[in-house]
Image (cartoon, helix red, strand yellow):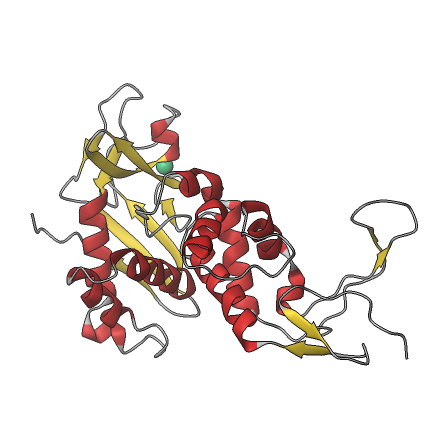
Amino acid sequence: MKKISACPGWLGLAQDRQSFIFLPDKAKVVQKIFQLCVGGVGSYTIAKVLNQQSVPPFGPSPTWDQSTIDNMLRNRATIGEHQPKDWSGGVKKGTPTGKPIANYYPAVVDVATFEAAQRVRKQNLVCRRGRKGERLSNIFAGLTTCFYCSGPVKFHSNGNAKSLICESVIRGNGCIRAGWTYENFEVSVLQFLTHPALAELLPPDHAIVGLTQNVESGNHRFDMRIEIASALQRMVSALRLANAGIEPTSTLPEAQIRRDKPERRFQISLRNGPTFMGTPIFRY
Ligand SMILES: [Zn+2]
């Protein structure tokens, strides 16, 4: 049998170099990195968190850095896949040859988590979020779209006013000029998702009820918000904002952006499940 020459940093190599060894402690670190990413935390902040917690890095470098995290989050070896490469061309990273081989390595994250991480990364949250610190201001990052134009709905901060507004509106490219105050939106959606009738429809690992209670009591706020964001990514497939109700009258391109119109609604679709229409909570 051919001997294995290299192996991902989170796995061990058996002494005869014929097989890989699953290392639970390192696997936990990889899972934590994916969880943070899916929760919307950028690679820069993930590296900072790991360094603060003195988590030993896998490679020769004494500390975690952003690019190591980025590479790991992209690496399909985390789900067990191996891409054979040709190293003869002198290319530093090798040239992929042939089809990837599934179940080549012991997987350390599941496919759903890996794909959620790619979705979040695609939304370009990573660098923007990472450098801003650890507040995790928007737990819905990458999930929200516009009911009217289907474009992304973005977290928009204007001094103290933080709201969710259609990207088209922010850029002055049309759509309905309305926004939803972030805090009210968050309360409304979480209240909706923790309703006992809905909680029954959710798989037990989506224990968002317990998580939100912890947030309200102020314990481990940042960690809990990450877990809620991560649970949302796993349970919600679409979250569409109708900031001006379901049948709004069109607005002029130069009209003021109106926030928190009373007719506003959100439409939420659960993964492999039903779609609901939710209303705002009036609690100020
Ligand atoms: Zn729109």
Residue 209, visible in the rendered structure: yes
Residue, far front? 62
Classify residue 2 by image quadrant.
Answer: bottom right
Residue drawn 17% across the image and 40% down it: 260
Residue 19: x and y in percent read: 76, 79
Residue 40: x and y in percent read: 41, 51
Task: Please give the count of numbered marks on the rendered protein.
Answer: 0
In screen coordinates, is 119 left or right of 134? Answer: right
Residue drawn 28% across the image and 18% down it: 254
Quadrant observed for ligand 1 in the rendered image:
top left
Q: Nearer the viewer, residue 18 or 100?
A: 18
In screen coordinates, is 15 left or right of 183? Answer: right
Residue drawn 55% across the image and 48% down it: 65
Classify residue 238 by image quadrant.
Answer: bottom left
Q: Nearer the viewer, residue 248 or 156?
A: 156
Q: Nearer the viewer, residue 96 or 232?
A: 96
> Relative to 53, does residue 174 appear above or below in the rendering?
above
